[in-house]
Image: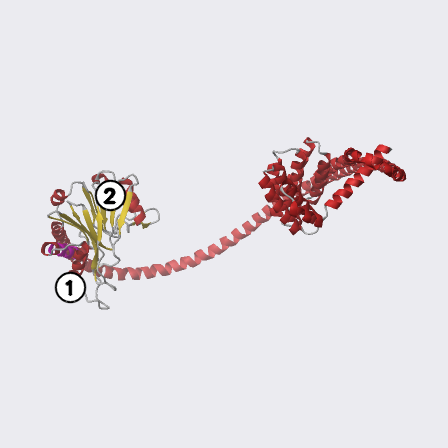
């Protein structure tokens, strides 16, 4: 009896001491002088004290405690502080922040002992998900906590997990799982109460040992202890009675559980009987339904056959009437045809005479066409003679190709090259119009270029284009009036100093591509001005580009005929990006092979559907700078 009395006295004394020290004003006063671990403990106790009063202040003190724990490099303190931070956020309904800090705590607790703290934190995370109405996440976390709590034989936490899981399963209408967890919950409920009582006794015994030291100093108080003894005795008897009544409650609950099981078994048997009755009913109903369907189909088939016979009979009668009418109509048509035959005989004689006259005109047209074709073919010879010869280009360049595909016999596209002293001048142009009109413009452009480079000492490429535009406008009488023709040409012109390898370029719509073989493989584009060689709304001097070439550079100039050609599966234009891709893929190959690749790709692109319908002419010129 004395031992139990000492335990009670110690417990009361220590509880009073903690209550005295734990008051908020005293803790705040203590904080001013506290340092190190004492400062952390004070901040931590303040956070706990404020938790139910002001979660915001609790969070502030918890954050300060965490900062102090980091200074002290104490992992256990950091975990405790993070727990308070998470709990304060939970109290303020800031669930994401609560989860974040609990997970930080969990990572630290995983490396520390005891593992019960780790399991509590895991349970806290599940509780936050539960409060945040995220039932699936909460259920997963509770089940994980339950498994670990059972492994660790942490009975109290397992009991709480069973309670929460049972509730969630019930809310989600998972009645079978809810029932299974409920059974386990009741098993643990008895265990937890007994375990709780044992733990209380263990705590009291611990506090007794701590208070025994004070017992010697309080011998004078034994008279008061005797009066307290009777109170404690009655409390002990009450505790025993509570334990007995709880055991009886457990027995009663077990009996109720068995009765519920019997009720469920009876319900299952009833459901089974009802299911058998329903199966028999639906079997009988199915037989009747199938028989009814067969009778209905047989009736429909007979009705359809009768309807068909009636309809066919009506059609026969109708057709016989139609045949009579048609016979009368045929007689009338025969009479009419006889009259038309007589008229046609007269018309055939007239048509025969007209045929002879048309044949005469046709022969004259063929003769005229032959004369025109002879003239155009002769014009092609003239145009070809004006273009640079293969021998001349061979004497100027070592490795090059020229892909020239006119839409008609003669073309508005032309290629021009000239070597003067240490300079090579190249131009690729696309003139307005196709056929003969375009050919005239190409001859005009070639003549003017020859004239300009022969009689003018020009330093920049753009000066040649400016002067060429002036001559084209003068020769065509273009003054920028509203209804005059806009004939002209698009052109890329560049000249190269063969000694210094400096290139000057100027262009009207037509760009210049330069591909250089380096570790990075550069594809460079010198862009043209967006104005033609001819009259334009806003004319300005053409831009002059200077560029330093290197040996091995590959230069490409071309008209827009290749990229504007329709073809492919969808009948669309070839486009500039596809043209650039072909050049960049094959630029290392010999020029003759590159020409063959471009030519074959062009044929494949236009296919059979577009073979006789070339939209533009095309002229492409390229060479290696060796």
In the foreground, 475 or 98: 98
Q: Position of residue 122 (x, y in %)?
A: 65, 39
For image coordinates 28% across by 45% down, the residue present is 523
Q: Residues within 10 Å of mark 1 (few under 14, many from 20)?
A: few
Against 478, residue 295 (above or below) is above
The numbered disc on residue 302 is none
For the record, the magenta segment spans 441-451
The residue pinned by badge 1 equals 474
Left/right placement of residue 469 relative to residue 211 reads left
Q: Which x, y percent locates residue 212?
A: 80, 33
| Residue 92 rendering spot, x and y as whole percentages | 65, 51
Magenta stretch: helix, strand or loop mostly? helix
85 relative position to 482: left or right: right
Question: Per the image, is 444 magenta?
Answer: yes
Give the image quarter of residue 269. Answer: top right
Residue in front for this viewpoint, 351 or 387: 387
Q: Is residue 300 left or right of residue 611?
A: right
| Quarter containing the N terminus | top right
Residue topped by disc 2: 599
Cα separation between marks 2 and 1: 38 Å
Residue 502 colored in magenta in the image = no
| Image quadrant where residue 169 sits | top right
User: From where the camera sits, is residue 332 visible?
Assistant: yes
Which label's residue is closer to the chain start, 2 or 1? 1
Residue 362 in view, yes or no = no
Q: Position of residue 503 (x, y in %)?
A: 19, 48
For label 1, the SS is: helix
Left or right of 578 in this view: 200: right
């Amino acid at each position: 009896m004395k031992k139990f009395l000492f335990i009670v006295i110690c417990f009361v004394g220590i509880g009073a001491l903690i209550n005295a020290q734990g008051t908020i004003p005293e803790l705040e006063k203590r904080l001013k002088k506290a340092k190190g671990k004492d400062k952390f403990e004070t901040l931590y106790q303040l956070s706990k004290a404020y938790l139910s009063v002001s979660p915001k202040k609790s969070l502030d003190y918890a954050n300060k405690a965490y900062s102090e724990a980091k200074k002290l490099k104490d992992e256990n303190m950091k975990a405790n502080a993070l727990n308070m931070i998470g709990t304060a956020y939970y109290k303020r309904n800031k669930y994401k922040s609560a989860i974040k800090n609990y997970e930080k705590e969990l990572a630290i607790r995983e490396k520390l002992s005891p593992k019960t703290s780790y399991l509590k934190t895991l349970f806290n995370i599940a509780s936050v998900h539960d409060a945040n109405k995220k039932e699936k996440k909460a259920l997963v976390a509770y089940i994980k906590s339950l498994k670990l709590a059972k492994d660790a034989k942490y009975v109290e936490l397992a009991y709480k997990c069973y309670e929460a899981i049972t509730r969630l399963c019930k809310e989600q209408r998972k009645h079978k799982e809810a029932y299974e967890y409920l059974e386990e919950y009741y098993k643990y409920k008895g265990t937890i109460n007994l375990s709780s009582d044992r733990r209380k006794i263990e705590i009291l015994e611990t506090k007794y040992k701590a208070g025994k030291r004070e017992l010697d100093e309080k011998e004078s108080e034994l008279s008061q202890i005797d009066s307290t003894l009777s109170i404690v005795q009655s409390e002990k008897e009450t505790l025993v009675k509570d334990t007995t009544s709880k055991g009886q409650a457990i027995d009663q609950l077990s009996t109720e559980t068995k009765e519920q099981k019997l009720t469920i078994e009876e319900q299952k048997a009833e459901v089974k009987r009802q299911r058998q009755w329903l199966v028999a009913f639906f079997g009988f109903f199915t037989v009747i339904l199938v028989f009814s369907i067969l009778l209905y189909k047989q009736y429909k088939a007979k009705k359809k056959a009768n309807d068909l016979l009636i309809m066919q009979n009506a059609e026969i009668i109708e057709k016989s009437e139609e045949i009579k009418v048609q016979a009368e109509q045929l007689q009338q048509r025969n009479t009419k045809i006889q009259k038309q035959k007589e008229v046609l005989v007269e018309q055939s004689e007239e048509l025969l005479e007209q045929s002879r006259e048309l044949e005469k005109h046709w022969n004259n047209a063929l003769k005229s066409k032959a004369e025109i074709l002879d003239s155009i073919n002769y014009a092609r010879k003239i145009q070809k003679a004006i273009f640079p010869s293969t021998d001349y280009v061979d004497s100027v360049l070592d490795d090059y190709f020229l892909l020239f595909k006119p839409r008609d016999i003669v073309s508005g596209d032309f290629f021009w090259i000239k070597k003067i002293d240490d300079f090579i001048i190249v131009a690729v142009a696309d003139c307005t119009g196709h056929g003969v009109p375009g050919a005239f413009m190409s001859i005009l452009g070639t003549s003017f270029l020859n004239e300009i480079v022969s009689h003018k000492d020009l330093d920049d490429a753009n000066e040649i284009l400016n002067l060429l535009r002036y001559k084209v406008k003068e020769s065509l009488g273009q003054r920028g009036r509203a209804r005059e023709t806009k004939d002209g040409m698009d052109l890329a012109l560049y000249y190269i100093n063969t000694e210094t390898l400096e290139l000057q370029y100027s262009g009207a719509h037509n760009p210049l591509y330069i591909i250089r073989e380096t570790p990075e493989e550069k594809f460079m584009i010198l862009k043209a001005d967006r104005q033609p060689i001819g009259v334009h709304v806003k004319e300005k001097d053409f831009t002059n580009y200077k560029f330093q070439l290197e040996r091995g550079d590959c230069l490409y100039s071309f008209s827009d005929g290749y990229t504007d050609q329709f073809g492919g599966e969808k009948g669309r234009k070839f486009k500039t990006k596809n043209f650039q891709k072909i050049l960049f893929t094959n630029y290392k190959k010999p020029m003759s092979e590159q020409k063959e690749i471009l030519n074959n790709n062009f044929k494949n692109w236009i296919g059979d559907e577009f073979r006789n319908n070339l939209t533009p002419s095309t002229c492409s010129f390229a060479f290696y700078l060796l």
